[in-house]
């Protein structure tokens, strides 16, 4: 009898727990995971899980704030909810709301750019952004260790979510701060092989502009090898930068005569500033160059970049490149 009584009490306890869970969560939470009706939720920097839960509840996304808040507390991903305007479905479960807030595709006003863009190009993108207001004041500048006020090279390529009304300076500051983190991670901020942090950034910008990620470490080595023996860098990308051009596989000889410190055919050593804004891989390759005695490299065809110390071998590959170029391989 006691055995059956104990079993009955156990079943009753389980039932009561289930009812309590149902009342605490299911009755206070929608079951749907999506909806055709949507709303926009503004998440501001520094807002807590409680703040977000309240906004979701007041906007009709979730039934009550407490369920979302408890879910967010137990999900580490909730800490990575990006600030910005999120497009979220109405009347969905708290778990679904969290998943949608973590979906970068639902953020309105996401700003991002790829590695290798120049400062002028990034500024033009910021000007066109609906979320960014005003103009650059000139007050946001790089860390003092770089001994420059020029932002070229310091606008780190990444995805950013700017709240509506973000000022131009605030947007630029986010990029510079993100650069500082990448510089610390790659250790270019510590200098390398006798080169200052700023010189390393210049090299990283050339590496970024000259090749594909799989070749970055080799290109980095070629640059160091040329600098070591006093050989002109002879980098087409630096002349493109001086002339504000893009995509020149081979430059006309007249352009090689341009009187600019960025003309690395005419002037030895590094150009005066970075020529692009490099990403993490180019920065890492700059302080981790491959081992080799190469002085020359040429992209014979897409995906096929070759490195050599021999000028004669380089000339042979250059002829191969010209044939492939005429055949339309680089179109």
Image (spheres, rainbow, N blue to C red):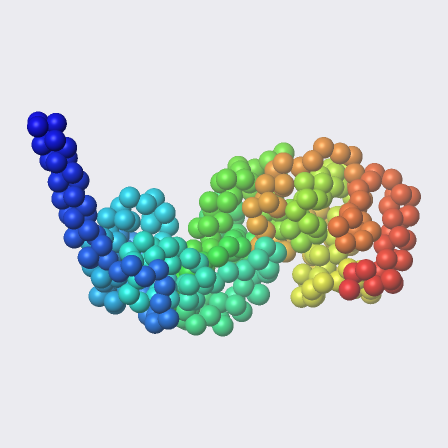
Against 199, residue 165 (above or below) is: below
**x and y percentages locating residue 129 in the rendered image:** 46, 70
Extreme residue toward the top, this view: 2
Extreme residue toward the front, this view: 1
Residue at the (86%, 57%) spot, across then down: 324
Against 150, residue 21 (above or below) is: above
Q: How many marks?
A: 0
Of 67 and 17, nearer the camera is: 17
Q: Is residue 120 left or right of residue 91?
A: right
Residue at the (35%, 70%) spot, across then down: 38
Residue at the (74%, 38%) spot, across then down: 225
Question: Can the viewer see residue 44 in this picture?
Answer: no
Q: Is residue 99 left or right of residue 31?
A: right
**x and y percentages locating residue 87 in the rendered image:** 37, 66
Q: Quadrant of residue 262?
A: bottom right
**x and y percentages locating residue 22 in the rendered image:** 19, 51
Q: Quadrant of residue 197?
A: top right
Q: Is residue 15 left or right of residue 104?
A: left
Quadrant (top left, top right, bottom left, bottom right) of the C terminus: bottom right
Of 257 and 311, nearer the camera is: 311
Quadrant (top left, top right, bottom left, bottom right) of the N terminus: top left
Question: Can the viewer see residue 21 in this picture?
Answer: yes
**x and y percentages locating residue 57 in the rendered image:** 23, 62
Residue at the (61%, 56%) spot, across then down: 116
Against 86, residue 12 (above or below) is: above
């Amino acid at each position: 009898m006691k055995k059956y009584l104990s079993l009955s009490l156990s079943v009753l306890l389980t039932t009561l727990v289930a009812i309590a869970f149902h009342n605490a969560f299911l009755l206070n939470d929608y079951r749907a995971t999506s909806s055709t009706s949507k709303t926009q939720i503004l998440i501001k920097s520094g807002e807590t899980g409680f703040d977000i839960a309240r906004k979701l509840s007041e906007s009709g996304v979730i039934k009550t704030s407490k369920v979302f808040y408890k879910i967010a507390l137990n999900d580490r991903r909730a800490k990575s909810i990006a600030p910005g305007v999120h497009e979220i479905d109405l009347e969905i479960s708290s778990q679904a709301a969290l998943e949608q807030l973590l979906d970068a595709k639902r953020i309105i006003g996401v700003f991002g750019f790829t590695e290798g863009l120049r400062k002028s190009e990034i500024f033009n993108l910021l000007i066109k952004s609906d979320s960014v207001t005003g103009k650059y004041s000139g007050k946001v500048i790089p860390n003092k260790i770089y001994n420059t006020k020029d932002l070229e090279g310091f606008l780190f390529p990444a995805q950013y979510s700017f709240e509506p009304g973000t000022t131009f300076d605030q947007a630029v500051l986010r990029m510079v701060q993100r650069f500082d983190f990448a510089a610390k991670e790659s250790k270019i901020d510590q200098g390398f092989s006798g080169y200052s942090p700023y010189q390393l950034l210049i090299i990283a910008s050339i590496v970024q502009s000259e090749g594909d990620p799989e070749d970055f470490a080799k290109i980095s080595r070629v640059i160091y090898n040329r600098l070591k023996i006093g050989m002109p860098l002879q980098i087409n990308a630096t002349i493109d930068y001086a002339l504000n051009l893009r995509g020149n596989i081979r430059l006309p000889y007249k352009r090689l005569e341009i009187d600019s410190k960025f003309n690395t055919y005419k002037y030895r050593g590094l150009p005066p500033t970075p020529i692009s804004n490099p990403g993490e891989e180019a920065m890492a390759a700059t302080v981790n160059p491959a081992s080799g005695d190469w002085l020359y490299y040429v992209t014979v065809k897409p995906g096929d970049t070759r490195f050599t110390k021999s000028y004669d071998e380089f000339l042979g590959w250059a002829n191969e490149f010209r044939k492939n170029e005429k055949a339309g391989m680089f179109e």
